[in-house]
Image (spheres, rainbow, N blue to C red):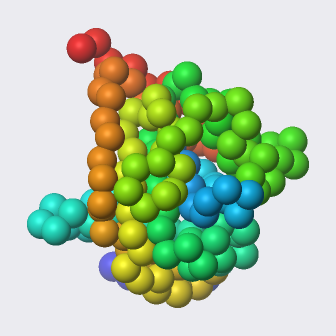
């Protein structure tokens, strides 16, 4: 039986999406003073051979143009100890651009994108392609370097809030 339903509005869609648990990652791009970054929960593996990831980035974010300009990005998967970093990269308190990198230790690997030194996992990527759909671009990256430090914990986003996920190792 087919039930007639009204079109889905943005508020209803966002409310339902907040019920899907997502890993919190910071996408970083750029070098020196020309750096930016944002929080995403939309990072997934695209291919293992060759290693590729995809992320969805809002085209109105300052980070989108930095990724396009520098042709690289890094995915930094966060743990519970990184909640303040997630808040800063989410724009809490009005922090923007290069200022989001304060109060954390960063390094570079192969592409020059910033990698969080104590991230749960980091993927340093060269940009393959940006596919525009709706308000976002699907950003496809070739993984050039990986760094992982599995401590049995992750920072997740669920029901509109950051939450710790910890397991016994």
Q: Nearer the viewer, residue 138 or 109?
A: 109
Q: Residue at x 27, y 66 (%)?
A: 52
Q: Nearer the viewer, residue 35 or 42?
A: 35
Q: x, y (%) of residue 84?
A: 68, 30
Q: Residue at x 68, y 43 (%)?
A: 101
Q: x, y (%) of residue 3?
A: 45, 78
Q: x, y (%) of residue 6?
A: 61, 81
Q: Residue at x 49, y 75 (%)?
A: 71
The quadrant where residue 139 appears: bottom left
Q: In the displayed structure, does residue 24 sit left or right of residue 109?
A: right
Confirm whether residue 82 shows in the render.
yes
Residue 27 vertical position relative to residue 64 in the rendered view, above or below: above
Q: In the displayed structure, does residue 15 sit left or right of residue 44?
A: right
Q: x, y (%) of residue 152?
A: 32, 22
Q: Residue at x 16, y 61 (%)?
A: 48
Confirm whether residue 20 shows in the render.
no
Rendered-image quadrant of the C terminus: top left
Rendered-image quadrant of the N terminus: bottom left
Q: As drawn, which residue projects farthest toward the left?
A: 49
């Amino acid at each position: 039986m087919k039930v007639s339903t009204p079109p889905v509005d943005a508020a209803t869609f966002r409310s339902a999406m907040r019920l899907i648990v997502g890993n919190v990652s910071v996408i970083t791009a750029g070098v020196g003073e020309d750096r930016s970054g944002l929080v995403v929960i939309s990072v997934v593996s695209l291919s293992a051979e060759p290693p590729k990831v995809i992320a969805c980035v809002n085209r109105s974010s300052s980070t989108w143009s930095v990724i396009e300009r520098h042709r690289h990005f890094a995915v930094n998967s966060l743990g519970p100890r990184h909640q303040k970093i997630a808040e800063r990269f989410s724009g809490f308190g009005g922090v923007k651009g290069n200022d989001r990198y304060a109060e954390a230790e960063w390094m570079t690997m192969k592409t020059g994108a910033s990698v969080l030194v104590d991230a749960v996992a980091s993927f340093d990527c060269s940009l393959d392609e940006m596919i525009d759909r709706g308000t976002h671009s699907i950003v496809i990256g070739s993984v050039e370097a990986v760094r992982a430090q599995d401590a049995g914990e992750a920072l997740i986003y669920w029901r509109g809030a950051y939450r710790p996920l910890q397991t016994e190792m």
